[in-house]
Image (tube, helix red, strand yellow):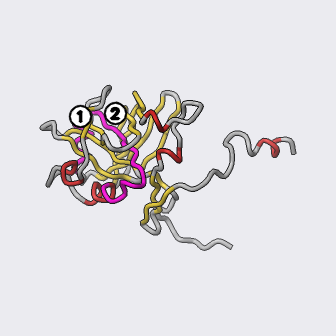
Amino acid sequence: MKTSLGAKTLAMPTPVWCVGAYDTDGRPNAMTIAWGGICCSKPPMLAVALRAATYTHGCVAARGAFTVSVPSAHHVAAVDFLGLASGRDMDKFAAAGLTPARAEFVDAPYIAEFPMVIECRLAQTVELGLHTQFIGEIVDVKIEAGLLDDAGHPSLPGVDPLVFSPGSRGYYRIGESAGAAFSCGRPLLKK
C-alpha cells in the first residue's frame, strides 16, 4: 500500500546543475539548480526552472543565453554555496574558488573546474507560477577528454555527477548500473 504525500515537488532524483549567465555589466554569475532536464531531442533542448527573485533569472532573461555546468561530487561544497549565495551581493566565482570561462558558442560563462558544460541559446520562456522555465536550445556540449568512454560518450562514473533528493534535501552520487537502456526490457516484448 502506498501513502499519499500530497502535491509536492518530490520527483527524485533531480540533476544538480549550475546555470551560468552574465549580468548586464558582463560579470559572470552562476547558481545551483535542481529543477531541470532534457525536454526535446530534436532540436536538442533542455529546460531549467528559476525563481524570478534570483539574480540569475534576470541575467538569463537579459542575455538570452545560459550554460549548464555539470559538477562532480567532489565539488559538493562549492555547488551548495552557489545555491545559497546571491550574485547580486558578491562575486560567487571568487568566493567559491572557481574559475569563470567564456562559452564558445553562447554569451554566457561556465565553471572551468566542472567536467561537463552544456551551452544553450534561450529558445523559449514559460511562466509557471513561482518559477520561470527557461528552455534552451543546446548548441554545444563540452566534456573533459579523459571522461569519454570507449564509444566516445560521457562516462557517468567519470563525470561523477550529483543528484538531489528534494524530500531529504540531500545531494547524492549515482550508483552502479542497473541495466542497459533500450535492451534489458526486450525479452518482455516477446510475451
Is 173 above or below relative to 105? below
Q: Marks 1/2: CA distance?
A: 9 Å
Sequence-first disc among 1 and 2: 1
The residue segment tinted magenta is 55-78
Q: Residues within 10 Å of mark 1 (few under 14, many from 20)?
A: some
Report which residue position mark 1 lands on: 63
- Assign the C terminus to one quadrant of the image: top right
Give residue 12's position: percent from left, percent from top: 52, 58
Q: Quick check: 158 left or right of 17?
A: right
Q: Quadrant of residue 60?
A: top left
Report which residue position mark 2 lands on: 122
- Residue 69 located within the stretch drawn in magenta: yes
SS assignment for the magenta stretch, majority: helix
Q: Secondary structure at mark 1?
A: helix
Q: Residue furthest front?
A: 146
Residue type at numbered disc 1: Arg
Residue type at numbered disc 2: Leu
Give residue 66's position: percent from left, percent from top: 31, 37
Is 99 above or below relative to 15? above
| Image point (24%, 53%), residue name | 96
Q: Quick check: 110 left or right of 42?
A: left
Q: Secondary structure at mark 2?
A: strand
State if disc 2 and disc 1 touch (CB < 8 Å).
yes
- Residue 61 located within the stretch drawn in magenta: yes
- Assign the N terminus to one quadrant of the image: bottom right
Give residue 187's position: percent from left, percent from top: 82, 44
Residue in front for this viewpoint, 96 or 123: 96
Q: Residues within 10 Å of mark 2 (few under 14, many from 20)?
A: many
